[in-house]
Image: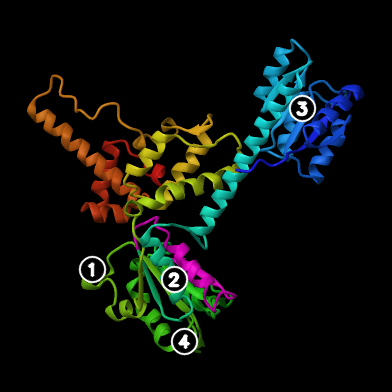
Amino acid sequence: MKTKIPKILLIDDEPEFLAASHKMLQRFKYECIATEDADLGLRMLTDMDFDLVISDFLMPSMDGVQLLKAVHKLKPNLPVIIITAYGSIDRAVACMQAGAFDFIEKPFESDHFKIVIDKANSYTQLLNERDHLLEQLESRYQFENIIGKSDAMLRIFDMVASVAESDANILITGESGTGKELIARSIHTRSKRKTNPFVPVNCGAFPDNLFESEIFGYEKGAFTGANQRKIGLLEYANSGSFFLDEICELPIGIQSKLLRVLQDRELRRLGGHDLVHVDVRIISATNRNLQEFVAKGHLREDLYYRLNVINIHLPPLRERQEDIRLLASHFLNQGLEKTGKKNIEDFSADVLQIFDTYHWPGNVRELENVVERAIALTKSRFIEVSDLPIHLQKPVSDEPRFDEVTLQQAKRQAMDKVEKDFLLYLLRKHAGNVTHLAEEAGMTRRNLYRVLEKYKIKLENWR
């Protein structure tokens, strides 16, 4: 890495010392701007780019700690070297705790001065190089807002680019948390419809009796409380894209009406007589096996084939091993920018190993939540294992405890552990959705609530 000549802001209220230090820096061939006024120096920082600030600790308008806080508020990563009087160890310690890169005691040798400056300059260049590499990495492996470098994701990126310009309906499949809506939005933003609305609808979010009026709209007087005409979401999406998330939850009574929209490009508002033309592209998504829903009569077969013209399947995160660390770094940088935290550098090696080996039932969404939580909790430069949720932390011992128990009791302990672990897995997978959880577990909702109570598991912690 070629060493860059640093541009230095020098601040000291003693004219003689300022002139001598300025001359010394020029002799080292550094670019330097000097001022006796700390407030003026801070104003310079807002208008000019510097690689380093060197300042005396005691000045009329502020001390070194106050200056450090002001500098880092303006330029969080800018290194600051504080000059202190000989024997002022308490001041030096205060400055280091406030985030100073280093301190120098007066009087000092020119060689030592140069060593400290060069060290700060190298640190700045390393930070800049790291940020540049991260930008390149994210740019190379980022498709819209989707991150991935695995072969599976690169194939999906190619497929999205290929199908976006067509008007064919698309079915996106994959487990919860894999990014189905992100893919749908990406298809929309790359299509000829991109300047028109993208309207997402979660099919499980509306009660059956409200679904029809929300999707198709209604005329004044259609039912009690319909005091004026309301445009439905399908009509609102005209000339754009209509995203039906969790299509398996679509009420059976609505399916025939949606099929007519797909066939004839027309709809009739609730309580209305006139047909309304709509031109929408339907993108649907599910984390279930739709063919099973068709076989059970929960989804019309003709509607299924209309929706599934093109299928894009998103693999779970556990099958995208190469993407885990890339995504974790992306979420870390995103979280640091969002929170304004500057003290966190990276994940510890132990955390990265856990990320690599964990099965991620909640997929990308779970990883994002884990990183966001760790950023909020950590107090060190590196995110440690203790900053992770309990279920990701390594157990103290994998050996079961059989002290003073009968064989029958040991069997019961083992069964309880399996039952609890299975429920926790389903809770993560379905984000606390009781209907989906009970169905996959083969239990009634009543029995499910009873078992959750047995293990003192609170649903609100998983939503």
Q: How many marks?
A: 4
Q: Position of residue 445 (x, y in %)?
A: 27, 51
- Identify residue for label 3: 66
Is disc 4 in contact with disc 3, using a CB cutoff of under 8 Å? no
Badge 3 crowding class, 10 Å Cα cut-off, few under 14, some 14 to 19, many 20 or more, is: few
Residue 394 spot, x, y in % from top left: 32, 32
Q: Is residue 375 magenta?
A: no
Residue named by callout 2: 160
Q: Secondary structure at mark 1?
A: helix
Tags 2 and 1 touching, CB below 8 Å: no
Distance Cα–Cα, label 2 vs label 1: 26 Å
Q: Quadrant of residue 344?
A: top right
Q: Amino acid at mark 2?
A: Val
* Camera-nearest label, 4 or 3: 3
Q: First in sequence, mark 2 or 1: give its number.
A: 2
The amino acid type of the residue labelled 4 equals Glu
Q: Which numbered tag is attached to residue 292?
A: 1
The kind of secondary structure element at disc 3 is helix
Q: Residue at 25% of width from left, 56% of height from top?
A: 439
User: What is the crowding at mark 4: few (fewer than 14 residues within 10 Å), some, or many (at least 20)?
Assistant: some
